[in-house]
Amino acid sequence: MPAVTRNIGLSLGADICWPLAFEQILADAKLELKVGKDVVRFACERVTLEPFPLQQGCKYDLVVDRLTHWFALQREWIKKSILMDGLYVYNNPWSVQSYEKHSTYCAMLALGMPIPPTLMVPQKNYEPKNDLEFTLKAYARLFDLGEIGRQVGYPLFMKPYDGGGWQGVTKIDDEAALRAGYENSEKWLMHVQKAVDGFDLFVRAVGIGPQVRVIKYDASQPLHGRYTTARDFCSKEDRELMVDTCLTINTFFGWDFNSVEALRKDGVFHPIDFANPCPDNQVNSIHYHWPWYVTSNLKWAIFCAATKRPMRKTLDFEPYYAVARKDLPYREKLRGYAKIARERLQADEFADFAHKHLRPIDEAARAWFRSDRCKDAVTKKVANMYPAHEVADFSARFFELVKQSVADDEKEAKS
């Protein structure tokens, strides 16, 4: 059988720990997969930043991208490579560029998701432009900020319509705080969104291809304490609902890798933040869940590269809207959306492929996460983030959580 090599590129910013894990586990697994008439091997390297002719070919079959959402040069190279060279990439770059939190709220409201009441307010200040004064004098209408607060209801959150990383987010408890928050909002275009007050569970569902992990989240903690190690914190039905929600959102917008935040109140999960198509994946924050992330990332990348999964260049919303128009309870609609999602992600084919071909990845990953190489990768990341006097303590803490996660997964698999 002819041997072919699939080339995987890692498009990176300040990523230190997970690329080391990805590269070393892939090398340790020594994969040679019989796919169709070929024996498929894999090579992996880091993508460089440099000038490129538009007609230059792309040597990669797949790129795991961490730059498109903020680095224009790489985004435009990726667009070119998709359009001209058949590259597969996480995530659809046009969607990442276009669909900010505001648009994603609108789309998921149209599908019936229980998004909290949200209202957009005009900017407090604007960038100077030639026609700005005329436009505002002719068409801008005065509004009563206090009335908006009463309409949405307190407590509420004021947050940028396209923000991320909690930047510019303010919790508002009364009209005085709302007015102060708006005065300080500068040139941000803001949403005001009713808080899900009295929620009893905060979760993050992280999706990589058809794989989803639902994590109990505690936003009140510092970054390294937010992703908790809890496992049995919700029912099977709740977990399935969040998996379906995550897959629906991700496939609607063409995102292979994205996270969904939701708050549960009175048995209903309210999605509050889900335009995150480059979510946190560093060991200093997700620690206990990092082995799942690295292994799932490897599996999806290998599947897509080995099978030459075609990149969906355009987004097709109509199948989801067709389900939304049906006279069905919301949970039944969500199952319909998730069915479309699993078909788009080839979930059954992926499961068969993983069962047949990817056990060496699991074995290599378990060994690597217990190794000195893992400890070294963790330490390198921590040293880049923490003061020197805290590096040893936090490195040891995160490494122990990584090993605990592997042990807990093995125990669960045997039970």
Image (spheres, rainbow, N blue to C red):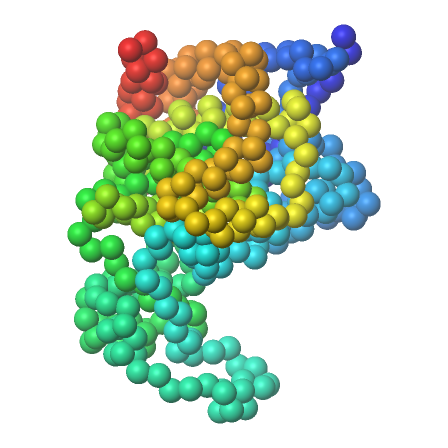
On screen, 184 above or below 277? below
- The picture places residue 257, in percent across and down from the top left corner, at 50, 38
On screen, 19 above or below 161? above
Number of numbered discs present?
0
Using residue 170 as the reference point, say whether residue 39 is left or right of it: right
- The picture places residue 28, in percent across and down from the top left corner, at 53, 13
Using residue 288 as the reference point, say whether residue 89 is left or right of it: right
Decide which of 322, 281 is in the foreground and name it.
322
Q: Residue at x 42, y 56 (%)?
A: 109
Using residue 353 as the reference point, say whether residue 240 is left or right of it: left
Q: Residue at x 32, y 62 (%)?
A: 117
- The picture places residue 228, in percent across and down from the top left corner, at 26, 34
Q: Residue at x 30, y 29 (%)?
A: 236
Specify whether residue 381 is in view: no
Specify whether residue 200 is in view: yes
On screen, 409 above or below 73? above
Decide which of 46, 384 is in the foreground and name it.
46
Q: Residue furthest right?
A: 55
Decide which of 92, 385 is in the foreground and name it.
92
Instruction: Name which quarter of the figure residue 393 lies in.
Output: top left
Q: Which residue lies furthest to the front in this view?
A: 327
- The picture places residue 248, in percent across and down from the top left corner, at 47, 42
Q: In which quarter of the image is the N terminus?
A: top right
On screen, 41 above or below 62? above
Q: In which quarter of the image is the C terminus?
A: top left
Instruction: Name which quarter of the figure residue 50 lies in.
Output: top right
Decide which of 334, 376 is in the foreground and name it.
334
Q: Residue at x 31, y 32 (%)?
A: 237
